[in-house]
Amino acid sequence: WTKYQPFPPVHLPDRQWPNRVLTRAPIWCSVDLRDGNQALAIPMNVSQKLEMFHTLVKIGFKEIEVGFPSASNTEFTFNRRLIEENRIPPDVWIQVLVQAREDLIERTIESLVGARRVIIHMYNSTSPAQRRVVFNMTRDQIIQMAMRGARMIKERLPRLKGTEVRFQYSPESFSATEVEFAKEVAEAVMEVWQPTPENKMILNLPDTVEVAMPNVYADQVEWICRNIRNRESLIISVHTHNDRGTGTAKTELALLAGAERVEGTLFGNGERTGNLDIVTVALNMYMHGIDPGLDFSDINRLREVYERCTGMTVPPRHPYAGELVFTAFSGSHQDAIRKGLREWNEGRRQYWDVPYLPIDPRDIGRQYREVIRVNSQSGKGGVAYLLENEYGIELPKELQREFGPIANDEVDRLGREVSGAELKAMFWREYVER
Ligand code: KIV
Ligand code: ZN
């Protein structure tokens, strides 16, 4: 981990967490097989889920939300196959989601019998709009519902004899909930589950729908971290979505604000605009010299599995994984990258510092690519490159300086990209036919 340097913080002595930088990776939990899957027009079948599960294990996830086993036979069967076919490595926790409802809890527990390590993730929504529109319940009734669900799960634990069980609670729509009330509900659940520092409970704080700026969410997370009772018995987890396009920023700020665990998906698959993209957050850390503990060294292959299993596509400009993100079109960028790479390859830099390439694409199994296109934005270098590479016409420096602006005027007039053949025709008109 010496190839990349931590980014130096800006010093503002009157501020607290914005001055800090991330120094280590959180606990990662993939929710691809649940939140990601529930957002697909055609959810994954069992064999697609199995392929995805094994891929997630290979990347290095130790906590994987495998589904909502009470929601469908496919989900239930998937759990059973994972367990009965012994497909879960001993150091991996499978996580299942369930609402605070008896019939669903019953079926969920049944799906887990025989597993080695499980996280039972119970949720109920807590925001004023959800309380009014969905449940028509008072605050107190919401608390009672959460406590009842927590009790029902606890009472059924003897059915999971031999299984290591961890509890997780999510006040769904946390970020739209009054923080004091979210704390009250979470503490009520803690009263039932009785977590200890040796046997911690996960308190997950979902930004179910993005409704505010990233700093606001981070403040909410920090407020909970500072005020919740028995904090040392909790793992504070964050779960952001991307309605305002700031899921990544929210997760990163929430980590600065005290969160220890992150839920998200590969490439941000998930409801509406998606869940947090774990690949981006992990590689952002990598870029600052932090070992993310997840292996993205073959991102092209990962992308191929993801696209095949989910039927989704990764957009060309998606951070790290998009087709175009390590491609330079502009002549000045290409020139700077070539010089930076030469410096790096000759061992003249201790840390990666190549202009326009924030990380070395080879670290994630990709390659830097130059695309020489000539349009009105291109300089004389691009024109000379195409004439030489496509037609063997080598322009001396002086002629490059003369012909460059002539070609540029013509390309500008056409208002589009031009091919090498068109450039050759322009050159011919200007110097041969005249
Ligand atoms: O976005 C959300 O609130 C969820 C919860 C069920 C954790 O997915
Ligand atoms: Zn979600």
Image: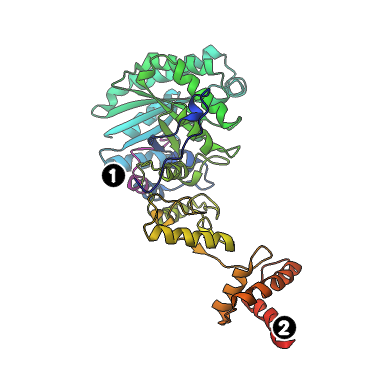
Q: Residue at x 29, y 41 (%)?
A: 88
**Is residue 114 in sight in this rendering?**
no
Q: Secondary structure at mark 1?
A: loop
Which quadrant is the N terminus positioned in?
top left
- Look at label 2 and name its amino acid: Arg
Queried on whether the Cβ of the residue with tag 1 lies below 8 angstroms from ligand 1, the answer reads: no
Of badges 2 and 1, nearer the viewer stands 2
Task: Tell me the tag on residue 429.
Answer: 2
Estimate the x, y position of residue 245 in percent, counting from the top left.
Answer: 58, 40
Kindly identify the residue that appears in the image at 48 percent across and 14 percent down.
Answer: 184
What's the magenta region? 55-69
Checking the image for residue 87, the label placed there is 1
Q: Is residue 372 visible?
A: yes
144 and 168: which is toward the camera: 168
Disc 2 and disc 1: Cα gap in Å? 69 Å
| Closest to the observer, 6 or 324 | 6
Screen quadrant of the C terminus: bottom right
- For marks 2 and 1, the one nearer the N-term is 1
